[in-house]
Amino acid sequence: MPSFSPDELLHQLRQRQFAPVYFLQGDEPYYIDLIADHLEQHVMPEHERSFNQVVLYGKDVDVASILGQARRFPMMAERSVVIVKEAQAVADLEAEKSFPFLEAYLKNPLPSTVLVFCYKHKTLDARKKLGKLMGEKASLVTSKKIYDNQVAAWLTAYVRSRQQQITGQATAMLAEYIGADLGRLTNEVDKLLLNLKPGQPIDEDLVQRLVGISKDYNIFELQKALVQRDVLKANRILMYFEANPKANPLIPNLTLLFGFFTKLLVLHQANNPSDADFKKLGIMNSFAQKEYQQALRGYSLQRTRDIIHLIRRADLQSKGIESGSMTDGEILRELVFLILHPVPLSAVA
């Protein structure tokens, strides 16, 4: 059977086109869960599920028990459904002794059964026998993680699919704050959608209020203060971070700053970057582009490289390397000072 993208397979399922065997694999669990949930909820009506639908968990079953369930005929229903969640934990799934039994079933599956393997955080080796078998006999979906520069566009499309709108600034905040974790991203967006008034888009204020980002004291405001070289504002934010360390952990903040200055380095190397250059980096809206343009003027190519080095140094310090007794707040405060008050790297201990 051919391989499908997650969207292609979901389109088929919405048309009620069901295959006898699905193998859902990959390092992005969001689509695996989405497809499995759709099959669990829509193959048969609710009143038929108690006798004809079973959900198994990989650590609790072996291949023999999975195939035993798959070979059961439905009771007073058109189909039965067998979903194997966390299939990567089935101890003998890839064992040589199990292959003949899997091969025999996949070559002649019970037409009334929909068998679903949810194989998360990894993929089968397509060169090995089981990988080849699933590629030939099952409806195969490989769910890949999206790149950071694709998050904003994906997020905008997701909100539109819910018949709602999101502002560019809110998109940028969510993309930067949450990143490419699609499960967490959709959970936060769904929470925001529940609080929208008719005709209201998801905007910056709603994101700050409901996602747990302080309106005035957050990493985005610190980033803006660095771009504008506003020492007073940066120090106010640092004081707030130090007073509220649980809400402002160091590592995510360093990650966001590293992402910003890494993109700035790429834009410097583009030499007068165009709109297309910004979009390649996932900088989709005019608000974010203006901030990067200001940073390009404020931080030279060499200075940007030095700052990236300083952020890496702070990351090592956060792990206890050459940090002495420094707290997380002190590490971030020193980093911000060195960004705003350039000194030669050779002078930095």
Image: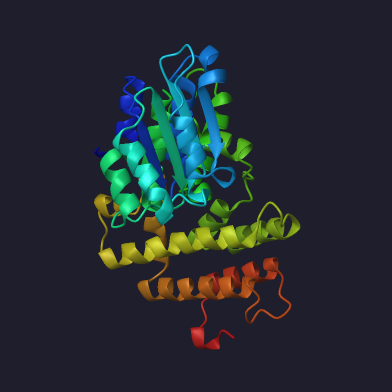
Left or right for 241, reference 158: right
Left or right for 339, reference 1: right
Question: What's the image's color scheme?
Answer: rainbow
Residue 101 can be seen, yes or no: yes
Please provide percent x and percent y for residue 95.
Answer: 43, 55
Please provide percent x and percent y for residue 202.
Answer: 50, 31
**With respect to residue 133, does 229 lie above or below?**
below
Residue 169 can be seen, yes or no: no
Q: Name the residue at 56% across, 52% down.
A: 221
Q: Name the residue at 42% across, 53% down.
A: 97
**With respect to residue 37, does 47 lie above or below?**
above
Please provide percent x and percent y for residue 243.
Answer: 75, 57
Residue lying farthest bottom?
346
Q: Nearer the viewer, residue 158 or 98?
A: 98
Q: Name the residue at 35% across, 25% down.
A: 13
**With respect to residue 318, does 64 lie above or below?**
above
Please provide percent x and percent y for residue 213.
Answer: 62, 45
Q: Nearer the viewer, residue 58 or 328?
A: 58
Q: Nearer the viewer, residue 330 or 53?
A: 53
**With respect to residue 228, does 168 lie above or below?**
above
Left or right for 257, reference 237: left
Residue 274, by quadrant, is: bottom left
- Tell me the quarter of the image containing the C terminus: bottom right
- Tell me the quarter of the image containing the N terminus: top left
